[in-house]
Each structure stands twice: as C-alpha cells, then as structure tokens.
Image (cartoon, grey):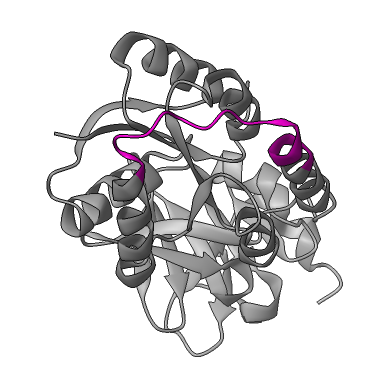
Amino acid sequence: MPTAIIADDERLMRDQLRLRLGQAWPELEIIGEAKNGDEAIELVEQLKPDFAFLDIRMPGKTGMEAAQAIGSKTHIVFVTAYDTHAVEAFERGAVDYVLKPPEHERLLVTVERLKTHLNKPALDVNSSVTAMLSQLAEKITAKPTYLQWIQASIGQDLRMIPVEEILFFRSDEKYTCVQTAKYEALIRKPVRDLAEELDPSLFWQIHRATLVNVNAIEGVTRDIRGRHLVLIKGKSDKLEVSRSFLHLFKQM
C-alpha cells in the first residue's frame, strides 16, 4: 500500500487534502501530518513514506527547504496557492504540484503521475530544481504581505474566499464567522490574529471580536442604549462598535 505524509500549517487544508486524496486514490495511506518543514523532515526520516505533500510556505523551514533535505528519500509533491508561477515552474521541474484548494480533476492527474513513480527511486532536488524553486520564492515574496484570500470551511468543503468578497468577520469563543454577500463560512483563527494579517486600509477592527470591510459599510447608527452600530450593505446585520474604535468613524 502506497504511503504519504502531508505538511501544511493550516489544519483545514490538511484535512481537505486528506479528504480529496482519499477520493482520488483510496489505496494511498496518509501516515503522518506536519505543521512545518522541520516536522515534515522528521516524519520522512521516521516513517519513510513514498510521497510527501509539502506546502511551499510554512513557518520554520519552508516546503522548499524541507524538499532539499528529503528529496532523495521520498517523492515530493508541492502544494501551493500561487497557480500562475507554480504551473510554469513545476511543469519544468522534477517534482509535481497540487494547487490550493485541491480540485478532484487536477488531483487525478497528479495521482496518475505519482503511481508511475512508486517503484522508482526518489529524485533528488537537484541544482536545476533548486534554482527553479528559488525563482518561484522570489515571485511569491514579492507579493503583498497581507492576506489575499481566506481558507474557510462550509460543511465538509474548504472554500478559498478572496478577502475583498468578505463583508465582515465576527468571532465567538471557538470559531470566527466569515460573512460574504452569498454565504457564511467558519474558520478557527481569532479576530486578533486576522487584524494583523489583513490590510488595515480595507478591514477595520470595530470591536475585539469584529472586523468589517470598509467597502461594505453602509453607515453608522445609534440604538436606544446609545451604542454605535455599523450597517452593512445588503444585509440586516448591525455590528456593534466598541468605544475604543469610535474614532474610526469621526470622518463619516
């Protein structure tokens, strides 16, 4: 039975990839999961999987750095959200790739490729592939540092939501609601972390548990208790503004 590990710092993405791989290749056994490149290297050393699915960008050692350490010991499959550059780079390299979110049809292509590698030695991440990955890393790091999309779960599915489509985020004790004009999704990341990762010119924090898209604000009103409430375009939701964030609306 073929075996693999998955390395991604997002739990939802690991769960989604495990699910999609199970559908595309039921015989493949996922024998380990890692949250960063260092853990991925340890898992490969301990478990000796046939394949390692590595997210390119992870804390600590990145997927690219991990690949250079383990590329001769297991077949590498990179997982990336950067489709344009990834397709150009990986089609020329000695590695395969999966785009986020993993789509069934594309994953079937990857699975067929991987099956042909099962009885072959792993390809070392040689100098040409390393150079290709370095070029890809430069293109990725040149992008804005703010989040461009959010990975959120809707039932058993993982949705990749462009941040500009999100009206607001609102947290409770366990989850954060991601509200768009068409649907509601859930993530585990708290508002305090999102506030540091989103463009502050696009998302304002108006409460310790609420972030709102500036472009989604229809206006601000006050209720009979004197609380300031943000009105959202096209929605009935009214989001309370904490006193410490009232200064954001002085110009409105």
Magenta stretch, residue numbers: 117-131
Residue 157 in sight: yes
Q: How many marks?
A: 0
The majority secondary structure of the magenta stretch comes to: loop
- Which quadrant would the C terminus be assigned to in this image? bottom right
Residue 222 in sight: no
Name the spot of residue 246 as percent of width and height, x first.
73, 58
- Which quadrant would the N terminus be assigned to in this image? top left
In the image, 165: left or right of 31?
A: right
Q: Quick one: 116 or 38, which is closer to the camera?
A: 116
Q: Is residue 130 magenta?
A: yes
Name the spot of residue 174 as percent of width and height, x first.
32, 40
Residue 154 to residue 143: above or below: below
Quarter location, residue 32: top left
In the image, 49: left or right of 125?
A: left
The residue located at (59%, 39%) in the rendering is 193
Residue 168 to residue 89: above or below: below
